[in-house]
Amino acid sequence: MDARPFLETLARLLEETGLEAILIGNAAAALQGAPVTTIDIDLMFRQTPRNLQKLKAVAKALEAVILRPYYPVSGLFRLSRDRDGMQIDFMTSIDGVKSFEALRARSEAMVFGGHKLRVASLEAVIESKRAAGRPQDKAVLDTLKKALDETKTKQPKRATRRLKERE
């Protein structure tokens, strides 16, 4: 399944509502070349009264409901749509990340359908999964580390190639 149309819609809605959120988890890793899959989309956001109103606007536009499956224990807000099983988790905290601002500094904007969507760095995804320590997170760590290593070895080659092209 091609997630691009959905990511385009999500990026547009986040931009239109002004809800600043950062894509995390396997979805973020996959967008950076890691050979992983996921069945849901996870994002981190700041929990403020204004942002909760923005989240409600996103849910309405997606024709979804907001669930609090672990309320009041966690800062998880799940957007769910029955007709197609869509699920988007918005979290106010994630393991291994000190704050939203700290994660934002370790993210980059990717463009989908002309709209920017912030995506956590592969390093941040790995650190979060390591800190969470859940079996499903541990199972993917070696794959993510290998993808990160491959990314790092390719970057210097690109820079060297650009320098040679300039000469």
Image (tube, helix red, strand yellow):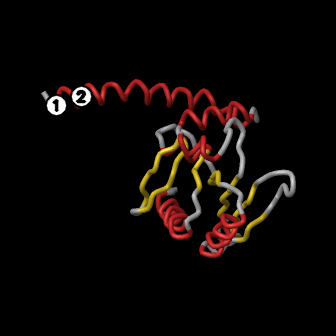
Q: Is residue 7 above or below residue 137?
A: below
Local secondary structure at mark 1:
helix
Q: Amino acid at mark 1?
A: Glu
Residue 148, percent across and down? 50, 29
Q: Is residue 167 above or below residue 50?
A: above
Q: Quadrant of the C terminus?
A: top left
Residue 141, percent across and down? 63, 30
Local secondary structure at mark 2:
helix
Residue 110, percent across and down? 44, 51
Task: Tell me which corner region of the image, top left, top right, bottom left or bottom right, holds residue 26.
Answer: top right
Residue at 44% of width from left, 62% of height from top? 115
* Disc 2 + disc 1, Cβ < 8 Å: yes
Residue with the mark numbered 1: 165
The answer to whether residue 2 shows anywhere in this view is: no
What is the crowding at mark 2: few (fewer than 14 residues within 10 Å), some, or many (at least 20)?
A: few
The answer to whether residue 64 shows anywhere in this view is: yes
In the figure, is residue 5 to the left or right of 22?
A: left
Using the image as rendered, state which of residue 102 and residue 68 is in the foreground.
102
Using the image as rendered, state which of residue 127 and residue 62 is in the foreground.
127
Residue at 47% of width from left, 58% of height from top? 4
Q: Amino acid at mark 2?
A: Arg
Residue with the mark numbered 2: 161
